[in-house]
Image: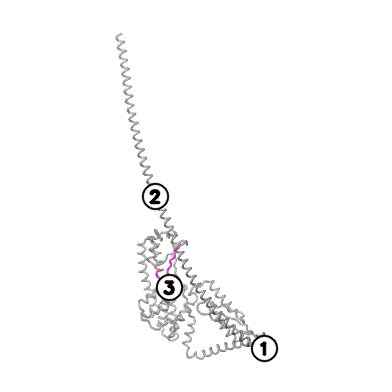
Amino acid sequence: MVFNSSSILSGIIGVLLGILIMFALGKLGLNREKQKAKLLVEESSSKAESILRQAALDGKQQVYELKLQAEKELKERKAEIQEMENKLLRREDSMNFRDETLLAKEKQVDDKNQLVAEKLSNLEKMEKELQARIDHQIVVLETVAHMSEQDAKNELMSVVEKRMEQEVAAYIRDKEDEAKSKASDKSKNIIALAIQRYAQEETIERTVSVVGLPSEEMKGRIIGREGRNIRAIEQITGVDLIIDDTPETITISCFDPIRREIARLSLETLIRDGRIQPGRIEEVVNKVTKEMNEIIQKTGEDTVFKLGIGKIDKEIVRLIGRLKYRYSYGQNVLQHSIEVAYFAGTMAAELGLNQALAKRAGLLHDIGKALDFEQDGSHMELGAKVARKYGENEIVINAIESHHGDVEPIGLISNLVAAADALSAARPGARFESMENYINRLEQLETLANGFEGVERSFAIQAGREVRVLVQPEKVDDIKMIKIARDIREKIESELTYPGQIKVTLVRETRVNELAK
């Protein structure tokens, strides 16, 4: 029994110990789980805070990038607005210039209209006086010849017309006979003066150059931020850059051809280099200007040496080189001057004159065109001033002043230079003329000749430098041919615009055929 009680007690104690041990183990496991949970919570909190901080940084970065993009778009919009404003300003300046030109032309038209009105008034007075005289003659004729008014008028007009034709034709023939009788004594002078009749002044300048761009994006780089690059180019070179809607093209405008050429070469260099900013622009322009001065001096020296005209002052040599960049009607002025020198020298040699002096005068006759876009005055005045300054021969100075007829020539060399100048400008292909203008000029020439009474047909030949007129032999005699030829010449001179001269040739032919059987 005692044994059983002890066993039971031991069992109970064992159970209690087991329960205690299980309770202790359970509490120990719970504490571990709590610690794990606590660690998980702390780790989650740390990760959440890290995620929040990263999200905040990402948000700030996106805000910063959006801000930069917005500022870039704003600057681009400002640049576009500035470019549009510049275009509007240039168009406004162009419109103002056109308005001034139109006003000047309107004034010229008004002055011409007033002059025409005065001439018409004088003609009306003269017509009234003439009509009064005719009426008086009609009365006299009616009284003496018992003729009607219409018959008397016809008779009077016929007599007056016939008398005038005979007097004019006789006067012309007498003058021509007088000129022929003196030809043996003045042969050299007549040859020079006859060639001089070619002379006619033509002056049109080319004031723009075009530069091609590799892409439209290059326009923006040339303009620069807020237009600083284009302003730097215009300020340093002294030209105007015209950037319009024409794709991949920039126009350079300037009356000074040297500045325009320097700007063109500088711009092409900058485009090839790719570095376009004010400092680089100034560097390139200075380099191109130095090279341009060397090219100009070398061109002048080569020209003088090629013609073999002796020593010339260095300043005049430099001006000769500048003519390489001057154009008139599309004709290069330096090439034109060289041609004039050759023509004048050849004719001088044929006439037994000083060939070297004639070449010198021919080369320098347009030297003033190297300065006429910088100084006031015509190119003849400026050229003569330069020639006097550097001690040129008086014959050369006179040739410069007289080659367009502004001053009387003092010798044959001056006449030869004027003739050579016209020959160089009038030769086929020397100056630009569109096909449409060429055809219109020929048609006008033929139409003008066909408008005269007694003319059967006319033909413009020799590229419009001669008009050959066929007259009706039964209506036009030899005396009347002289008057018609002179009238056609005067009408051509007054109504048509043409380079050089136009020869008028009248042909009167009578054919008589008989058949022998």
Q: Secondary structure at mark 3?
A: loop
Q: Secondary structure at mark 2?
A: helix
**Which comes before the other along the chain, label 1 or label 2?**
2
Residue 311 lies in what quarter of the image? bottom left
Could you say where residue 39 lies in the image, as x and y percent from the top left? Answer: 33, 33
Q: Which residues are magenta?
A: 249-259
* Side of 397 relative to 134 (left or right): left
Amino acid type, residue under disc 2 in the picture: Lys
| Residue 301 visible in this rendered orientation of the protein | no
292 drawn magenta: no
- Distance Cα–Cα, label 3 vs label 2: 54 Å
Could you say where residue 336 lies in the image, as x and y percent from the top left? Answer: 44, 76
Say the numbered circle drawn on residue 326. 3
Q: Look at mark 2 in the image and give the residue it sits on.
A: 67
- Distance Cα–Cα, label 1 vs label 2: 108 Å
Could you say where residue 78 lies in the image, as x and y percent from the top left? Answer: 42, 56
Question: Badge 3: few (under 14), some or many (20 or more) residues near its Cα, within 10 Å?
Answer: many
Q: Look at mark 1 in the image and give the residue it sits on.
A: 142
* Side of 142 relative to 338 (left or right): right
Amino acid type, residue under disc 1 in the picture: Glu
* Side of 222 relative to 514 (left or right): left
For discs 1 and 2, the disc positioned in front in the rendered view? 1
Q: Are marks 1 and 2 in contact (CB under 8 Å)?
A: no
Question: Badge 1: few (under 14), some or many (20 or more) residues near its Cα, within 10 Å?
Answer: some
| Residue 327 visible in this rendered orientation of the protein | yes
**Which comes before the other along the chain, label 1 or label 3?**
1
